[in-house]
Image: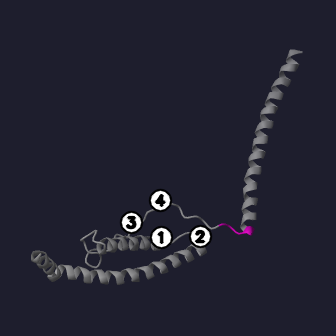
Amino acid sequence: MSEEINDVVDNVKQGSTWLRILLMLGFYVVLYVVGVVVVFVTLAQALFSLFTGSDNQNLRQLGASLSDYVAQILRYVTYNADQRPFPFNPFPAVGAVVEDEPIEKPVPSSRQKTKAATDDKKPARKRKTTAAKKTSGSENKKTSGSENKKPSDS
């Protein structure tokens, strides 16, 4: 039993363990700050989406980097990784943007829907008119061909 107590005392005296615990506390503060930054990035991205109709690529890249950074911190503080996150190692790459799902466009207002519906009808009418011309043109050919045959037969 004294051997077990000696092992515990040795573990408590190890400077690397205390350093890791101290770093973990510091990274908890960093997680809080990054969380606040993510809220601002999210709000800015929402505003860009409202005013421009699409997202901002720079904010998307920043969000991707921040999420990778948070993942690194969480792996470190949960003892799933021994590699220390930034500032002890490089910050995650900025170009790590995943574009697996398109972002939905906002639903147009009733005024825009009316205009869009009108715009949709215009090409459809043209197609029908074109199809009708083709049909009437082919009927004319058939008719003209049959008319040509009838006088020649008689």
Give the Cα separation between the discs numbered 1 and 3. 12 Å
Specify which label sits upstream in the sequence, 1 or 4: 1
| Viewer-closest of 123 and 57 | 57
Q: Secondary structure at mark 2?
A: loop
Which residue was labeled with disc 4? 100
**Image quadrant of residue 114?**
bottom right
Which residue was labeled with disc 1? 57
Specify which label sits upstream in the sequence, 3 or 2: 2
Residue drawn at (81%, 37%) of the image: 136
Looking at the rendered image, the quarter that the N terminus falls into is bottom left
Give the Cα separation between the discs numbered 3 and 2. 23 Å
Which residue was labeled with disc 2? 53
Give the Cα separation between the discs numbered 2 and 4. 19 Å
Farthest-out residue, front: 1
Residue drawn at (47%, 59%) of the image: 100
Q: Position of residue 93 (x, y in %)?
A: 34, 69
- The answer to whether 153 appears left or right of 113 in the picture is right
The residue under label 2 is which amino acid type?
Answer: Gly
The residue under label 1 is which amino acid type?
Answer: Gln
Graded by Cα atoms within 10 Å as few (under 14), some (14 to 19) or many (20 or more), the crowding at tag 1 reads: few
The residue under label 3 is which amino acid type?
Answer: Ala
* Residue 110 magenta-highlighted: yes
* Residue 74 magenta-highlighted: no
Give the Cα separation between the discs numbered 2 and 1. 13 Å
Q: Secondary structure at mark 3?
A: loop
Range of residues picked out in magenta: 107-111
| Viewer-closest of 73 and 117 | 73
